[in-house]
Amino acid sequence: MISEKRLKVILLLLATIIICGWLALLYIQSRSTRQQLTEEKLHNLLFLNILKKAIVNNIFASETIEKVLLSRLELAGEILQDQQQITTRQLQQLCRKYYLHELSFINLQGRVINSNLYRGTYPHDLSLLELQVEETLVLAVPADTNQVFGSRILIRKKPTLYFVGAVSDSVLLESTRDISLSGMIDFVEGSLLENSERIPSDEHALYVVIQDTLGIITATSNITTLPRLQDDEFLKKIYRSQQVNSRFTVFEDRTILETVSPFLLESYDFGVIRLGVSLQRFKRAQAGKNVILLIFSFIFLFSLFLEYLFYRNYKKLQRSREELHTSRRMVEIARLGGEVAHEIKNPLNSIYMILQRMQLEFEVKEKSEEFADLFKVSYSEMERLNRIVEQFLSLSRQLEIRRIPVDVNRIISAVVDLFSSNTGGVQIKFETQEKKIFSLDEKLLKQVLINLIKNALEAFDLAEGKKEIIILCSRQKHNLVISVQDNGCGIPTENLSRIWDMYFTTKDSGSGIGLAVCKKIIEGHGGHISVKSDSKGSEFRIELPEKQE
């Protein structure tokens, strides 16, 4: 069979492996969480960079479209100048085809030569512009009371006339709406709304904001107000350092991940661009990992618990083996001791009878008093030796308990009366109450009480003050409780665990059998006997069940 020391080493090694495995799982879980959060930040940064480049490209594209339209006007002027016979209807068709608002040829006196809009005198005095020949001027004309949109007008002076072409602001807006800054934000917001039809609203980007020191430049429609850039230390730090960073913040009463990047375009400072993203996907992934961690933690703890149960049962088995071996030895010793005690008892009786005959039948003439004292001592020692043999025999014999209903108070009173004439100044108190009928062995209970009271009497120093023994008897639920208390010298703490052992005694004339016999009798009734003791005295407590299990 494996030794206990080796088993401990194996179990400790297994426990160490289990704990290390659990710690490794915790480390992997923590590292996976950090890695996933880093990936979320990188995705946000990639999206912001793509969005920034798209916005920059589209802003330049808007300017290019405007230049293309104006260049188209210039080209139209060059072409039409060589075709003086072109009709008004053709001009109108040309304007509709190229989304132009006006194509007009005006002489130097302000009369309309040809135009898709005007006849007769031109409504504006172009001479006030003081243009040189071949000089071109582009004007932004606001809308008047009859127009919704204004115009971008190109005017070029030729030697004999003015060429006037115009593009409506509505055409420019329509051409650049999808690629302008506000158009890009509308596109992002439209993507969010489109995704929300397929993906729950808490699993995609929540908002995009472009913000400078003066306020919000543009944002998705779910953003109405935000703290100023100057009032947010995190935004101020990014704006000053021109470095990208992410943080956890609160949006619509929930925690989100916000990535912020500086946004500069040539000489224009847009401030910062902010992207807010839900953490729902991250949290759901974390919840799944936490479930796995919880399952493995339960497995690890259960394994450690099984190890503990195995070791405890192993120890119990070892103790049971030792107790069984000890019990077998004690049975053999008790059997042998019983036989020896019987063999001792027979010659003791013979010696006792011889001493009686010698005392009664023989007369001693010399030193008769000394002879009488020797006989008295011999009788006393013979009685003590006989009492020890009787106690040993009672302990070695199989205990036979004969339960009958008896009055417990009457039994206690009878035992107290036995000591009434020989207490050495110790007062024994027991107040007789109403009958307490209980089923037990009267003879054996008397033996227990006699031993306990005798031990209590021997615990007193008769030279000191008031001494008393108090006996109490009560019923608690279905148990009978008898308490024997004294205010003697008490039992030393180091001896409390040994007083029930066979042959343990601190008295010169004691046998060390009495309390062992008491314990055997009480346990034979299915009860329990215990002791509490200190320097102020001792209390022996007997608890007997109403029915023996």
Image (cartoon, grey):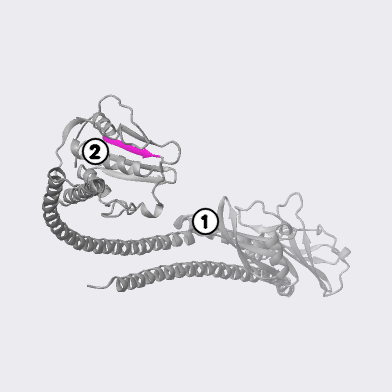
Q: Indicate whether 514 appears above or below 276.
A: above
- Name the residue at 49% across, 54% down: 201
Viewer can see residue 102: no
Give the farthest residue toward the top: 434
Q: Which mark is residue 545?
A: 2
Q: Secondary structure at mark 1?
A: helix
Q: Indicate whether 199 appears above or below 39.
A: above
**Screen quadrant of the N terminus:** bottom left
Secondary structure of the magenta portion, mostly? strand
Residue 196: x and y in percent read 49, 56
- Name the residue at 30% across, 42% down: 454
Tell me the distance, in whole angstroms, between the alpha carbons under discs 2 and 1: 79 Å
Residue 320 is covered by the magenta coloring: no
| Residue type marked 2 | Pro
Quarter holding residue 269: bottom right
**Screen quadrant of the C terminus:** top left
Q: Secondary structure at mark 2?
A: strand
Residue position marked by numbered label 1 in the rendering? 193
Boundaries of the magenta span: 478-486
